[in-house]
Amino acid sequence: MRVLKYAILGLLRKGELSGYDITSYFKAELGQFWSAKHSQIYPELKKLTDEGFITFRTTIQGTKLEKKMYTLTDSGKQELHAWLTRHHPIPETVKDEFMLKAYFISSLSRQEAADLFTDQLLKRKEKLADLQRSYEKLMASAEPISFSSPDFGHYLVLTKALEREKTYVSWLEHISAMIQEDTQERP
Amino acid sequence: MRVLKYAILGLLRKGELSGYDITSYFKAELGQFWSAKHSQIYPELKKLTDEGFITFRTTIQGTKLEKKMYTLTDSGKQELHAWLTRHHPIPETVKDEFMLKAYFISSLSRQEAADLFTDQLLKRKEKLADLQRSYEKLMASAEPISFSSPDFGHYLVLTKALEREKTYVSWLEHISAMIQEDTQERP
DNA sequence: GTTCACATGTAACCGGTTACATGATTGA
DNA sequence: TCAATCATGTAACCGGTTACATGTGAAC
């Protein structure tokens, strides 16, 4: 599959970037749906260069610090476009360790289950608040967002991540209520 | 992390299972949130046996076919309980290749983007329908679900997967509408 | 002068997938 | 008798993380 390959080609779609820049994108909003460490990125950049999908020029930052700025080649642009327009099957599994635990809830007491769900709810609410702040910032800065906006991709990942977290929170609230119901019956 | 370790210990919580049985669980409803191939499961079962978390007895299916039935040891039960009650941080990234593409939408024409979203919407709706059928089946079979139901874990994964897909579908519908809006403006 | 961000790389290891390999049982 | 399912394993490879390793630049 080599998705990282396409992630890098995609990030280079608007112009040249360094390996460090690419790492930064994965730490920002795109990190909600894809990420990679610098230790994986640098070797991949080398591989993509060898394969002819990207090229680089070396620039100097200050007086000594070398930086490699990568650009898409025509072949790289083609490769990116082919991947973007290809239709992929949706994955059967999207791993979620918390949901794995939830499946084993019969091994927990009511109190233990309630603690687990309360903790998760707290963490998800914090994340939701972070995303809401990012969303408000985006909405404040730009003209009304549409397909033609340069920020449309950013808008897509933010709104999707927001919906994901909202759904998580309301599901957790619903289940927490169920766990605390009828505390008179069996443990 | 070794999450597969805990997934296996968890599946063994109610009694003995073979490696094949464990594989089957990952192909069923639990597969929405965790899965593993048999080529990973068999070596892990061996490792867990060596570590003293599980034991097995060999049974005969028919006249010749050998099957190993695994059970939790006391140490395995402890290990499972410790993991279940531990609070984990939520992951920063949950990978989604479609959303990675979405972030790069500026490299697609309106028509190409519309095609991509239409295809995804179709696939998500199919998945949602499958999950809805499973949910109706569960609701038809069992008494009203509560914390004490033996099927509560099953209920949790099904309802969560349903919410996830519903959210995906409604988000895709919303974005598809945005993509098709104002088709008089720039390409 | 110290801390934080910028900047790039490699090595060892681990988790997971694909492919290779084999055979028995059940039901149509 | 044929196909699907039951049943277990290994080997090669790949994607990703953690740790090791080094150095510059900017701002306080």
Image (spheres, coloured by chain):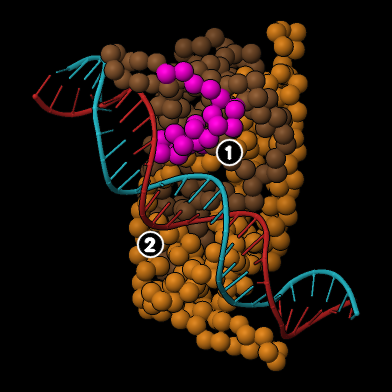
Chain colours: A orange, B brown, C cyan, D red
Q: In this view, does A167 lie above or below B137?
A: below
Q: Position of residue A126 (x, y in %)?
A: 75, 45
Is A53 placed above or below C22 here?
A: below
Circle 2 — which element? helix
Q: Which of marks 1 and 2 is in front?
A: 1
Q: For the residues marked 1 and 2, what is the alpha-carbon distance in whole angstroms?
A: 31 Å
Q: Position of residue B53 (x, y in %)?
A: 60, 27
Q: Is residue A180 magenta?
A: no
How many numbered circles does the render carry? 2
Numbered circle sitting on residue A83: 2
Q: What stretch is highlighted in magenta?
A: B33-58
Which residue appears at 60% of the width and 66% of the height? A38
Q: Which residue is drawn at 43% across and 72% down?
A: A48
- Name the residue type under label 2: Trp
Q: In this view, does B70 lie to the left or right of A122?
A: left
- Letter of the chain that mark 1 sits on in the rendering: B
Which amino acid type is marked by label 1?
A: Val
